[in-house]
Image (cartoon, rainbow, N blue to C red):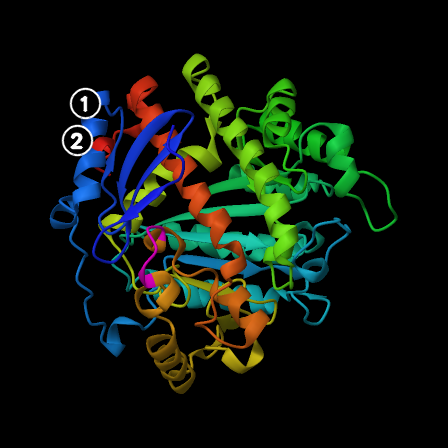
Amino acid sequence: MLNEDVIFGPNKNNIYFEINSERFLFNGDTGYLEYQISKGRQRQLETSIRLGILEEIFQAKSSQSIEIDQVFPHPQIFTVFIAATCNMACSYCLNSGGTLGLKNEIMTTETAKNITIFLQDYVQKTDYDLITINLYGGEPFTNPQAIKEILKGLEQIAGMGYKAKLKVLIMTNGTIYNEELISYIKKLKLDVYFAISLDGGPERHNAHRRLTNGKGTWQEAFNFAQLLRKEGIHFSVTAVVPYPYEYKETAEELIEHGFKTFEIKDVIPYSYGGDPSAEIYRVDFYLWRKKYLEYTDFCLRTLQRNRSLYLIDHLNLIDNHLRCYRFPSPFGCGLFRYKIGIDVTGTLYPCESFVHSEYSLGNVRDGWKDENVTSFAKLLHEEGYLKRDHLDCKVCFAKYVCGGGCYAVNWDKSGKFNEIMTERCLFIKEKLKIDLYFISKLAGIRPDLTKRDQVSTQCL
């Protein structure tokens, strides 16, 4: 076994590592992944690394200069906060009860109508093939009138023959079933999907997801899902798994209760603007790694024997990695450029998490505010090269996947874009290695799930 990872290359962006006694070679600049490495090839690689020969093969990718006009927004994803209020009090809520720390209120139907007018103007001009609109909260179903108004407008836009198709995702806790609204959605000529929050079985779910009066909500969420299934409305389940990171157990419970399409989300609480000690991270890391690798192996076994399941969090890894290396961005995530947040008042923000009044970009009634957009573009252009220029990121094999972390979290913690949360780097690097292990193994057992436009996953 390797005693430790081997990091090498001109910018130290390449890694030779081992997971479950299998060895992998990964180029963090290009995304090249080599796996199923024979013993002879292992000896050759290790000799080449020791002699520095691989330095010539894995040259660092040259940075491209980004002009200011390349920073301006061209969003493909719009997250709309239907309600800045929630009927629940989840133990791990990162959204201040749905308010994002702002005023507790719901969207008016007038604002909802203005949003559809704004989106129509955008959709008819864009060259995208698909635009996604996420209806979010708080809890969206506390405001059925605004949901209906937006969906009515989006259906009209979808029927106008524009190039861009519309996809709508409604994220809900599943505790408020509005029969009239569901009946309306079923009749729409519009692609509408639901994501229901359901954290495994009753005991696990109710330990964290309760109403404000303390009552558990598993039965309500489960019933909501069953009613959507009966109505023939597409939905998936999202399970948030906090400490002690029992991902596999949560997935097993969801499968046991008949769910075939779901996403497991991790929560490492001290990552979100907290001030953790090194000891907390060190202790949690080993438990998290054990649990995440255990869940990854579970996903491989399950996908091999059950072709009706779609494990969103792991299967989406393939497209996410291809996107990172086919279309590398010096800015990391799509904040400001490819995704936009719209709050309950119709104010436009750089993303659904970066909701700061001083950085609003305009509103849906009057459109983009040119001076605000230009100001934020300059800020992002000057301070946003997290993974390209930051000293810690420049020499990291995970830079094109991580991007230096979340801008919103960095800003909330330090008031700076280019502040790197180094305490989470260990998690991110290890997760990338385990994810690459998953992709390589999946390519062997389910090549139908890894094939993308004739691109071999052997050379991701």
Q: Name the residue under label 1.
A: 40
Q: Tell whether 74 sits left or right of 170.
A: left
Whether the residues at callouts 1 and 2 have beta carbons within 8 Å, the answer is yes
In the figure, is residue 96 to the left or right of 343?
A: right
Q: Quadrant of the N terminus?
A: top left
Magenta-colored span: 394-398
Residue 423 falls in image quadrant: bottom right
- In the foreground, 263 or 330: 330
Q: Is residue 421 depicted above or below 414 in this figure? A: above
Q: Residue, x 35% and y 24% (percent of image)?
A: 441
Q: Does the magenta stretch include residue 287?
A: no
In this rendering, would 95 be left or right of 22? right
Residue 328 image offset from top left, x and y in percent:
26, 56
Q: Which amino acid does label 1 sit on?
A: Gly
Q: Position of residue 343 (x, y in %)?
A: 57, 67
Q: Is residue 34 visible?
A: yes
128 or 373, nearer to the observer: 373
Label 1: how many residues lie within 10 Å, few (<14), some (14-19) or many (20+)? few
In the rendered image, residue 301, in percent from the top left (x then y), is placed at 46, 17
Q: Which residue is drawn at 46% across and 15% down?
A: 306
Position of residue 116 measured from the top left corner of the image (x, y, whole percent): 47, 62
- Provide the residue designation for mark 2: 44
- Using the image, determine if residue 251 lies above or below residue 307: below
Q: Residue furthest bottom?
A: 371
Element on which disc 1 rests: helix
